[in-house]
Amino acid sequence: MKNKTTFKLSIVLICMVFLLMGCMGGPSPEEQIYETLEKVVSVERDFEKQQDPLVELEKKEKELYDEILTLGMKEFDQIVSLSNEALTIVADRESRINNEHESIKASKKEFQKIDSLISEIKEENVKEEADALGTLMNQRYDSYEELYSAYTEAIGHDKKLYEMFQNEDLTLEELEQQINLINETYEKVVSANEAFNKLTEEYNKAKVSFYKNAGLEVVFEEE
């Protein structure tokens, strides 16, 4: 029926051991950017917490859908019961994807703090790298919005499908049309998810490169 996926990469948590810059005075712009970027990781933890539960919910929903398709109209009461159960799962998925979205919005708000710090960087090559990092992360945020939009659209189509199952006059043509619509929408979800994952990987690599070139002594640890 549907090709769903909610596996999304997480940004990397990096632990600072000590700094090679700004040891005698206040924190340098590079150090402050480091602190901000690692706060972004913390803010996105709620985003990460939604991943496994979403996948489990999708699996349960798919099992219910498959079971519904094995039933005939003589078992309509059971179809209604199963579709109601599926609607509950869809509502849970919707709640979790909205929580995920809120986490990403909070991440973006925190990340924007680096804008004023970049202009204070003295070394031009490091400043350019910080600018590129900011551009990449903003592309990641835009990509997530596309993913969120496609996923919420798909959830809306899922709801309608399970409501349709509760109509005794449902025709095979109507059912096929709705399933085709759902499949098309989940194709957009998969495509948006792949784009988001790619940008997340690129951002993680670019962040590590920036820290190294900025002279920050760090230990790189993926969670």
Image (tube, rainbow, N blue to C red):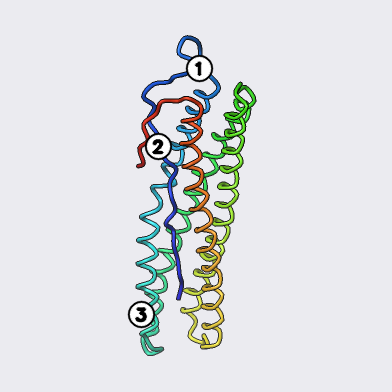
Do the residues bearing badges 1 and 3 touch, measured as CB atoms within 8 Å?
A: no
Image quarter of the C terminus = top left
Decide: few, some or many residues near mark 1? Use Cα within 10 Å; few <14, some 14-19, many ≥20: some
Q: Mark 2 points at which residue?
A: 13
Q: What element carries label 2?
A: loop
Q: Earlier in the sequence, mark 3 or mark 2?
A: 2
Name the kind of residue labelled 2 in the image.
Leu
Q: Name the residue under label 3.
A: 78
Name the kind of residue labelled 1 in the image.
Pro
Q: Which of marks 2 and 1 is nearer the N terminus?
A: 2
The residue that appears at 45% across and 25% down in the rendered structure is 216
How far, Cα to Cα, is label 2 from label 1? 20 Å
The residue that appears at 61% across and 35% down in the rendered structure is 131
Numbered marks: total: 3
Q: Name the residue under label 1.
A: 27
Question: How far across and how far down the image is residue 175, in percent?
Answer: 52, 82
